[in-house]
Each structure stands twice: as structure tokens, then as C-alpha cells.
Amino acid sequence: MSIDESSTGGPGSVLLPAVAPEVLAEAVESLSGRLRKKLDAAIEGCAAGAVRAADGSVGVRFGEDAVVTLRPGPSGVVTEADQAVCGCLLAPRCLHRAAVLGASPIADPQEPAPPAPGPDPVTGPAAAAGPGAAPGASAATTAARAVAGPAAGPAAGGAEGAAEGEGLTAAQVRAAAALWGAAAEALAAGVTAGGAVVQAELLRAAHTARIAGLPRAEAAALRVVRGLRAARDRSAAQRLAELTGAFRELLYTTGLLASGAAGAGLTGAVRRSYEAGGSLRVYGLCREPVLSATGYGGVATHLLGVDGAHYSVSDVRPGGLSRARGAGAASVALGGAVLDHAGLARGGLRVVGATVSPEGRLGAGRGVRATAVGGVAWGEGPTAALFSRPAAEAVAAMPAEGAEPGLLGCDVRVVGASGDHVLVRELTPGAPLLRLAPAHPHPELPHAANLRRIAGHPGLVLRVLGRPDLDRAATLRPLAVGPVPGAEHSLRLPPEWLGRADLGYDRLQGAHFPGGAEGLVPQESAPAAGADPLADSPLWRVRRLLEAGVAGGRRAVAEAARGAEPAALAAALRRAGFGSAAELAAALTAEADRRPRDAFGRLANASAERYAWAWLAAAAHLAAAERSLVAASWA
């Protein structure tokens, strides 16, 4: 197991070791109902009172008679129940022990257990009924309807969009159904009521999913739990939009898996180790600072193979901002190569006995040997392909979701500034207006300062290498820039920079720009704010409704349904042509406000699973509609 770097638990949480999800879930499950009600209050302040002993254990004192001691294993993670002990009389079923475990970061399982044995793959009508499906409709139908895209609405029926079952076992279907139910309850509770007990139920179901061989579902559940924790702690690193996306991913994955109609690919892949890559020759592209909210810092240097494959060499360790700034000039720990990251970003390597991760990271194994070689300028050799096609074409070829977008290059002309963005237009006929946004907004990193300097030179042409932001309209987050070959009014960089400036490390100065302003005549005036089809569409109303449900739970959506907001939302969506979005939003608010009664006319608890299906349908439709608008903004 490894500690997830995005986990936070307050200022003192660095003293508390990470805890395996199943250990925390078991501790909460063992509490009585009375103690569970006190758990959230008991968790507050635990991390601040942690004290590390000389033997590596961590202790937290509760009054005079109780001390909880955590003794993590060699990996630094508490993986067994007996590694967390309390000195009170009620231990191990005590509030103190559960509170300390609840305040600790959640560990990320490194290798899921092998799938549990089960019968033949589930097929047939009996397997099609998913959790919370409406009478007469299969879960596959509901899920396919939820993810059918912008053109789909409540009238979209059938399971034509769902994949055929490909090897799912009965154990996997049951595990997915249990995790779906826990996720539905967590969504109905929202952040306000999603305390330690709700999180423990998710962790218990996630552990069952791991045993059944569903790593993708388990990872989605852990993201939701970490997001709930950060939101309840009011962490500055938490974004409600990210937690909303995590809920959507969890419900979508478990809903399809529980229906038995999903393909085996939806189960996810077990994390694989580095594999032999043979002999490689790679060339540097640029450096990128890495900075984590939990104190990790470093650098990632992006490389390109002679066959066009993308690789990287990273060096990330505890140290925060100071290390992120200094790592750009640190030595490259790879096969004895006498080279630093600054030199590698503009040079190259010949690697013998290379080891490569599935994501393209080069490993520094014992048998790896690396020799420095000369680099190539942008646009030469294998790097020419990065700048050979329009940005819109490159973005269209990238995966819609589920993976980090790759790097793309383009030649642009500066139009002007718009807030902290630089408006540019690609040097191709009919190209749209693009936004260059800081790759990292930290003020101590030079991304934003470099972009401000560039924005001050309208008419300047430059070559940009960056990563598209697929959540924003026509937005590119540049990692490096350089002069356009043959252009008169372009950047003038020192020869030793090999025609590129890493925006996270190199600082552009006045001497790097064309002298005088007589040649820098803007081809067009910069608009006050560039047209943004995503921000200008009324879909923001649906997004606000979904995020309100995540923050305040079902009750918040029900309250919104009783005012004038639903009518205004539906009218605005229909005027803009988003009729399906209006119907899905109306169905969500109606389900949230539904108050069923039993046979005796008494109010009964509304189904959390029916509400989750309605929320997922609206969320999936919104995500597909926004992706379509973003893709259109690049064309």
C-alpha cells in the first residue's frame, strides 16, 4: 500500500500514518449506535494531538486513562487491526480507537486481491436488474439512458448502448451492487451528513469490491471518501466540482457493473509494475514542476521516443514548494546518467535495459544504463509530429475522459490578455480563439508571470507546447514556449536554451522579446472577454443543482424544487435547446421531493437508490453536453 498524496486530515495529520480502508471500516462497524453518533465530534482534534515516539509509533491521548497507539508496518501503513490499540476498558470496540483511525489518511491499496471464485459469468434476465432500478426497467436500460449523451432524454430506451456481459462473476455483481447502495446513501446524505459512519460504509463496500476484483470501482469509492473528508474539513485543496465528478464516476461504474451488462473492461486494471522496455533513445521536450497540497514537490521531465512514444522521468519527494523549485536543476537518477533535469529537457538519453511503467515513466532499476546524447530542436526529428497538425485535430484524437490528456504543440499569435489568461489564435486559417492559462497557479512558480509578459506583446508569434484543459472551452495550459522558425517577430531565446523556455522554471525577460513595438502590430483587437460557449450556456444551472445535492444532500435538492428556481431552470434550458437537460433536471428535483407513504398513510423513507439514478442521469447528461461544447470550442 502507498499513501495517497491528495489525502489530508488537518494540520497535524502528517504525524498520523495512513490506514487501510478495511481497518477503519471494521473499527467503525464495531461501535454501538450510541458511540457512532459521537464519532464525528471525537475525530476533530485527534490529528493535532498526535505525538510520534522514538520507535516510530504514534500516540494520541484522550484524557487521563486512554491512549491510542498506532504501530504501522514496514510500509508505513496500518494494515492490521492489532496495529491500532487503545488502553481503555472498552478497547478495541471503543470510540477513541475509531476516532484516531478516522482522523488518519486513507491508504491506497497497491495490489488488489485476486478475484473471489464464483460461478459462470452472469447472464440472462435475472442478472439485468440492477440496484434501485424502476419496476419494469433493467438497470442496463437506466444506465444506458443516463450516459447516452446530449441527444438522450427520458424517452431514450433500450439497452442497445450497454455492452454485453463479458466475464463478470456473481461475486463481482454482488460487490458492485453493495457499493452502489453505499454510494447512493452517501449521495443522499451529502457532505453535511456524510460523516465517518457514512464514509465507513463506503470503505467497507470498497474493500469487498477489491476482493471481488473491481479495482476501478474501489478507486472511485476512495476518491469519494477523500473528497467528503476534505469538504467536511473545509480543505482549501477540495473543489466541489471534483467531488461531484467522483460521485458520478462511482455511480456510473457500480451501476453498470451491478446490472451484469457491463464489459469486463469496466472492472479496471490491477496496478502493474515497471516492465522491460529494451533499448530506448529519447529526447527532452520540457520540464514541469510538481507540487502537492500535502507537502510533496519535485519535477517531471517529458520525453519523446524516436517512434513518437511519450515518456517521462520524475523526481517527487517531500519538500513542498522549495523542492519543486530546486528539483528542476537536480541530477537525473537514471542509470548513472551524468545529467540534470534542465539538461535532459533540452538533451536526450540512450537507455539500455529500460524499465517503463504503463504510464510511460522510466524506472531506475539496477540493470538500467543511460548515456546522455544531444537533443533536437522542436519541430525536428520525432518532435515534428507534435506540431504538424492543428490543435483541434489533436484534441479530437484524445480520449474523452478517464485519462490525462497528452501534450500538443501549436504555433500561435498573441491577441491580448483576458484576466489571467492570454488570448491567442493559431496560425492556421479559420482557427478559433484559444486561451493560455497557467499550468500551475502558485504565485511562487513563474507560470503566471511568464504568461503576463507574453500577454503584453500583442502580435507576437510563438510556438507552444502544453496540455489541453478538457474541462474548459478552448483552453491550453502551456508548459513551454519557443520561437516559431522563420518568424520575424517571435521570441529570442539564448542558444543554450535550444529554442524553448520552460514556463515553470525559466523566467522570460525583456531581452527575450523582439526589440521595439513597431513590428508587433496586433492582427485583431483583444475582446474584453473571449466567447465561452460553456460559461455562456445555461448548463451552469444544472451544474449548480447537482453540486447543491452533493453539498447538502437530497434535502438541498428538495428545497430547490419548492421555489421558483425549477421553472426558471427549465425555461432557460429549453430556450437554449437543452430540452433533455431540462427534463432530467425536473425528474431529479421531483424525485428529491418525493415523500412516499406506506399502506397506512404514514410517511416512509424515500429510496436513496431511485434518487441516485435520477442524479446520475442528470450528471452524465451534463458531462456529455459539456464535453461536446468544449470539443466544439476547439474547432
Image (cartoon, helix red, strand yellow):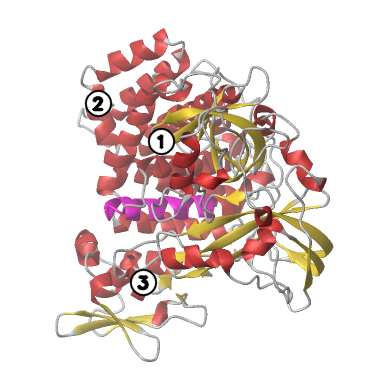
First to last magenta residue range: 217-235
Residue position marked by numbered label 1 in the rendering: 612
Numbered label attached to residue 14: 3
Q: CA distance from mark 3 to mark 2?
A: 40 Å
> Mark 1 or mark 2, which has the lower sequence index?
2
Is residue 501 visible to the viewer in this orientation of the structure? yes
Picture layout, residue 255 above or below residue 575: below
Which residue is identified by label 2?
560
Q: Nearer the viewer, mark 3 or mark 2?
A: 3
The numbered dot on residue 261 is none
Residue located 40% across and 52% down the image: 442
Q: Quadrant of residue 432?
A: top right
Mark 3 residue element: helix
Marks 3 and 2, the one that precedes in the sequence: 3
* Nearer-the-camera pick, 95 or 190: 190
Relative to residue 536, is residue 628 drawn left or right? right
Q: Is residue 320 above or below residue 617?
A: below
What's the amino acid at mark 3? Val
Closer to the camera: disc 1 or disc 2? Answer: 2
Q: Is residue 139 above or below residue 533?
A: below
